[in-house]
Image (spheres, helix red, strand yellow):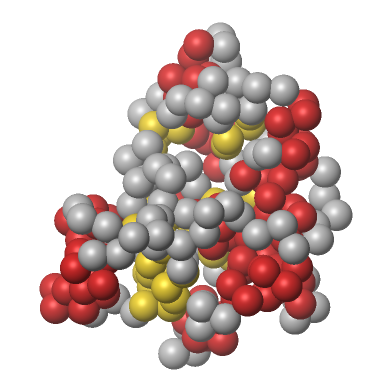
C-alpha cells in the first residue's frame, strides 16, 4: 500500500497536526486528489470542540476537505489521555484489527491519504497494539515530525532507529521549532542530527504562537517544506 503517508512524531505535541495541515493546504493548492484521516483523537470533550478546536478540524479547514469530521476522525475520546486509556475509561473496547481495517478502507478510496498518528511510535492505541503496529499494518511510508529543543536529538534518533529496525520506509523528517527563543540546542539540532543519522530533512518550521487562521499564512508556511522532494520520496522516485 503506497498511496499514502503516515505522519508520526517523536513525542506528543511536536507539531504533527500543523505539518499535516500544511501538507493538506499544499495538496489542495496543487489540485491533487487526497484524503486525510486521524484514526484516533483524544480530548474531544464536545461536538463543538470537535468542529472548532480539534486537530481534525484544523486540517479540514487548511485542506478544504469536504468529508465530515466523523469520517476524518472515526474514533474519538473525551479525555486528553493516551487512546487506550481514554477508551477504557469510557468503557470502549477497540481492537487493533478493527482500527487498521477502518483506515485501510479509507485509503483504498483515495489517490493519496495523509494519516496522522497519535503521539510517538509507542503510544498504546488498543490492547497489545501501538502506533508502530498500525504503521506496519498500513504499510505506508513515514514522515517523522520532531522538535528542536534540548533532548530532541535523543528522541529523534531513537524514533528513526526503531522505524528502521521494523523495516519501515522512512521518507524523512520535518523539524519544528516549538519556542520563540532559540539557543545553541535549537540552532545546532539539524547539524548534530546529520552527524549521527543520514535522514533526509524535508523541512524546518518556524515557531508559531498559534496555528495559522488565514490562507496567506498557510501559504507562507508551505515555503518551509520541500514539498516536491517529499512527493518524490513518497513515490520512490528519489
For the residue pair 65 and 46, the one nearer the viewer reads as 46
Q: Is residue 133 above or below residue 93?
A: below
Q: Residue furthest bottom?
A: 238
Residue at x 73%, y 73% (from the top left corner)? 216
Residue at x 43%, y 45% (from the top left corner)? 13
Q: Where is residue 21 in the image (x, y as percent from the top left)?
A: 63, 60
Instruction: Using the rendered image of the protein, determine whether residue 138 is visible from the camera's viewpoint.
Output: no
The quadrant of the picture occupied by the C terminus is bottom left
For the residue pair 94 and 79, the one nearer the viewer reads as 79
For residue 237, side relative to residue 130 (left or right):
right
Residue at x 14%, y 78% (from the top left corner)? 195
For the residue pair 124 and 100, the one nearer the viewer reads as 124
Residue at x 50%, y 11% (from the top left corner)? 89
Instruction: Using the rendered image of the protein, determine whether residue 40 is visible from the camera's viewpoint.
Output: yes
The quadrant of the picture occupied by the N terminus is bottom right
Q: Is residue 88 above or below residue 94?
A: above
Q: Where is residue 183 in the image (x, y as percent from the top left)?
A: 23, 65
Amino acid at each position: 500500500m503506497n498511496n499514502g503517508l503516515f505522519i508520526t512524531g517523536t513525542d506528543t505535541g511536536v507539531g504533527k497536526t500543523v505539518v499535516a495541515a500544511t501538507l493538506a493546504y499544499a495538496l489542495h493548492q496543487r489540485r491533487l486528489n487526497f484524503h486525510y484521516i486521524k484514526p484516533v483523537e483524544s480530548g474531544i470533550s464536545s461536538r463543538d470542540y470537535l468542529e472548532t478546536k480539534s486537530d481534525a478540524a484544523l486540517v479540514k479547514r487548511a485542506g478544504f476537505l469536504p468529508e465530515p469530521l466523523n469520517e476524518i476522525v472515526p474514533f474519538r475520546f473525551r479525555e486528553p489521555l493516551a487512546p487506550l486509556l481514554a477508551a477504557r475509561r469510557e468503557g470502549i473496547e477497540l481492537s487493533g484489527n478493527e482500527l487498521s481495517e477502518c483506515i485501510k478502507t479509507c485509503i483504498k478510496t483515495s489517490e493519496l491519504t495523509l494519516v496522522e498518528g497519535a503521539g510517538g511510535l509507542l503510544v498504546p492505541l488498543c490492547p497489545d497494539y501501538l502506533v508502530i503496529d498500525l504503521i506496519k499494518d498500513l504499510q505506508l511510508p513515514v514522515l517523522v515530525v520532531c522538535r528542536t529543543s534540548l533532548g530532541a536529538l535523543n528522541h529523534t534518533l531513537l524514533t528513526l532507529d526503531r522505524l528502521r529496525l521494523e523495516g519501515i520506509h522512512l521518507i524523512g523528517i520535518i523539524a519544528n521549532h516549538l519556542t520563540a527563543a532559540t539557543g545553541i540546542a535549537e540552532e545546532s539540532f539539524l547539524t548534530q542530527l546529520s552527524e549521527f543519522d543520514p535522514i533526509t530533512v524535508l523541512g524546518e518550521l518556524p515557531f508559531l504562537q498559534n496555528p495559522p487562521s488565514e490562507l496567506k499564512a498557510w501559504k507562507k508556511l508551505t515555503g518551509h517544506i520541500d514539498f516536491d522532494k517529499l512527493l518524490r520520496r513518497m513515490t520512490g522516485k528519489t
